[in-house]
Image (cartoon, helix red, strand yellow):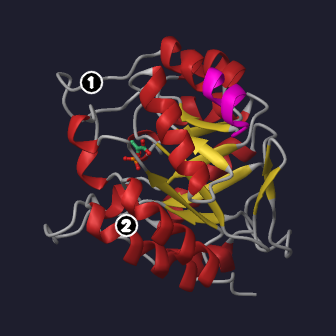
Amino acid sequence: LVSRENHPERSTVRVAGVPIGPDTVTLIAGPCAVETPQQTLEAARMARAAGASLLRGGAYKPRTSPYAFQGLGEAGLRILADVREETGLPIVTEVVNAHDVDLVASYADMLQVGTRNAQNFALLQAVGAAGKPVMLKRGMNATIEEWLMSAEYIAQRGNLDIVLCERGIRTFETATRNTLDVSAVPVVQRLSHLPVIIDPSHSGGRRDLVLPLTRSAIAVGADGVIIDVHPHPEQALCDGPQALVDGDLEELARVMRDFPPLM
Ligand code: PEP
């Protein structure tokens, strides 16, 4: 279903009317985690200032440590809905558990499946049945074939509104948190009709790499980027070191403008 064999044209996925696909480079930005109404609103304003058309923000955080901030849950979803009302930005937010899919889908414009759940087949089937577009991150240890098979689980439930997100894979390299596999973009675009975006924040794990990796994403033909921003990253409850700050926004907007999509 996700293969280009029977579907030669590359697809555009619309999230509350916002296109992600071959004719554009969509910017999704926002906080890694929803922490407070004020922080989320400020981050959304930063996202909009940089030219984002969708707001990201996690209310359910799949953390490596059980002692780390796990997200605000439904209270976080309510904050996102309020911020959408205030800014007009549709919401992309993660769901980590099949039992929460209906709840998260009742708030979200796009459901995100994270790297740690990329082969949680019950979750993939549940998001496939939820009637909302889905952003499927690549499992950090997943081959491209395995990633596409995960997408197939979603598609099989009748949902072809799937955006694939390359977010870095595990390699021997320790200088970056993960290794961004830029080659995945053209490889997947040849194999699948689904849009492919890049997450330069979670791949590098470092603020200073976000703009260079964004340039690489656009240059290689990605259909969008998803970027963490935070008004006060030193106080962030999750992934502060990779969040862009106010001073980076103009440059981000310029990078997005200066690199037209490859046709
Ligand atoms: C995220 O985008 O909030 C996230 C946790 O990303 P990943 O699943 O890629 O680690």
The magenta-colored residue range is 81-89
For badge 2, the amino acid type reads Val
The one nearer the camera, 92 or 124, is 92
4 left or right, relative to 81: right
Residue 88 highlighted magenta (yes or no): yes
Q: Residue at x 46, y 71 (%)?
A: 251
Q: CA distance from mark 2 to mark 1?
A: 23 Å
Of the numbered discs in the image, which one, if any, rests on residue 26?
none
Instruction: Say which residue label 2 marks.
Output: 210
Q: Is residue 189 above or below residue 238?
A: below
Taken as a whole, is the magenta stretch helix, strand or loop?
helix
Please identify the quarter of the rendering in which residue 204 is found.
bottom left
Instruction: Say which residue label 1 marks.
Output: 69
For badge 1, the amino acid type reads Phe
Q: Is residue 16 above or below residue 74?
A: below
Q: Residue at x 25, y 61 (%)?
A: 206
- For label 1, the SS is loop
Crowding near pointer 2: few (<14 within 10 Å), some, many (20+)? many
Q: Quadrant of the N terminus?
A: bottom right
Residue 234 in the image: state x and y as whole percent. Answer: 21, 41
Residue 84 in the image: state x and y as whole percent. Answer: 67, 30
Residue farthest toward the top in the current orientation of the protein:
75
Regarding residue 105, the answer to whether it shows in the image is: yes
Q: Residue at x 58, y 26 (%)?
A: 80
Q: Is residue 260 above or below residue 162?
A: below
